Image: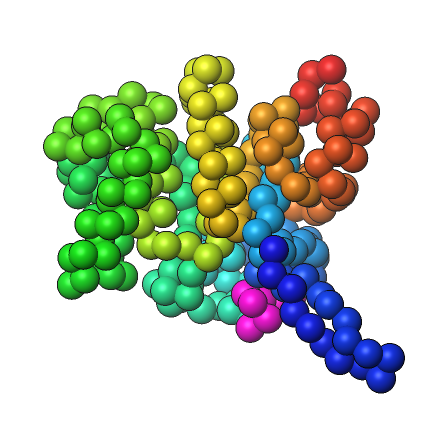
Amino acid sequence: MKLRMMTRSSGPIWEVEKVLELSGLSVHYGTFKALDRIHLHVEEGELVVLLGANGAGKSTIFRTISGLNKPSEGEITFFGKSIGGLAPDRLVRAGIVQCPEGRLLFPQMTVAENLQMGGYIYRGQKRLIKKGMEEVFELFPVLKEKKDCPAGSLSGGQQQMAAIGRALMSKPKLLLLDEPSIGLAPLVVEQMFAVIQTIHHSGTTILLAEQNASAALRIADRGYVIENGKIVLEGKREELFENDEIRRAYIGA
């Protein structure tokens, strides 16, 4: 976690640097308000989970951070600089990389080719791309075994690994993971969250959108709950895990 020193008349004050901050963010689809004055932040080195049911607004938040949607109101800042409305390629170069829901791999291309696509901002720097692929293969050994196979031939869990690996090829300062557990068997989900925790512990700041509150809260530092386009609850991992409403709605206990 990175600290920034500020000076006041009473002496130095240390503040934790915010990687991402959404302030009063609203998004409209025509007359429909998909997001309603969202306030959310992620500090450097954190893993923050965004919990919510299907259609609650999680993916809309991610698409807006990534530049695929334009904010109607409010502001998005990345390391203190306003980024709302910037093109997606500029945001990737700045360090914001999204692993989308549904993986969106190129099924006819090999695993290695899909990973190379993730490192397109480093095209022409063969050593850097090679090093990135070696790091992905170390994290996901099965992808090395399958590197020459079409991505569409992989199992669901292996495809999710390839999608996360492709995102890591861009060396993100902020990794957005949108529903990485969706459609996976329970054992694979457990393995996937263990890998996400490893990525986090390596120093990557992560914003994770999930319906699987039980798995997500076990590895998160803090969390937000979104319903109908509004943040209705926020707190530390322990606070959300012990909240009776959260347990009934998302954990089933």
In percent of width and height, residue 146 lies at: 19, 28
Which image quarter holds the C terminus?
A: top right
Which image quarter holds the N terminus?
A: bottom right
122 left or right of 44? left
Q: Is residue 97 above or below residue 48?
A: below
Residue 224 covered by magenta stretch: no
Q: Is residue 8 above or below residue 16?
A: below
Q: Quadrant location of residue 192?
A: top left
Of the pair 19 and 253, the residue shown nearer to us: 19
Residue 80 covered by magenta stretch: yes
Of the pair 208 and 229, the residue shown nearer to us: 208
In percent of width and height, residue 233 lies at: 76, 41
Residue at position x 36%, y 47% in the image: 168
Q: Is residue 180 above or below residue 125?
A: above
237 left or right of 85? right
Residue at position x 15%, y 29% in the image: 149
Report the magenta residues as a range. 74-81
Say if residue 42 shows up in the picture: yes
Main SS of residues in magenta: strand
In percent of width and height, residue 27 lies at: 59, 57
In percent of width and height, residue 142 lies at: 26, 26
Q: Quadrant location of residue 78?
A: bottom right
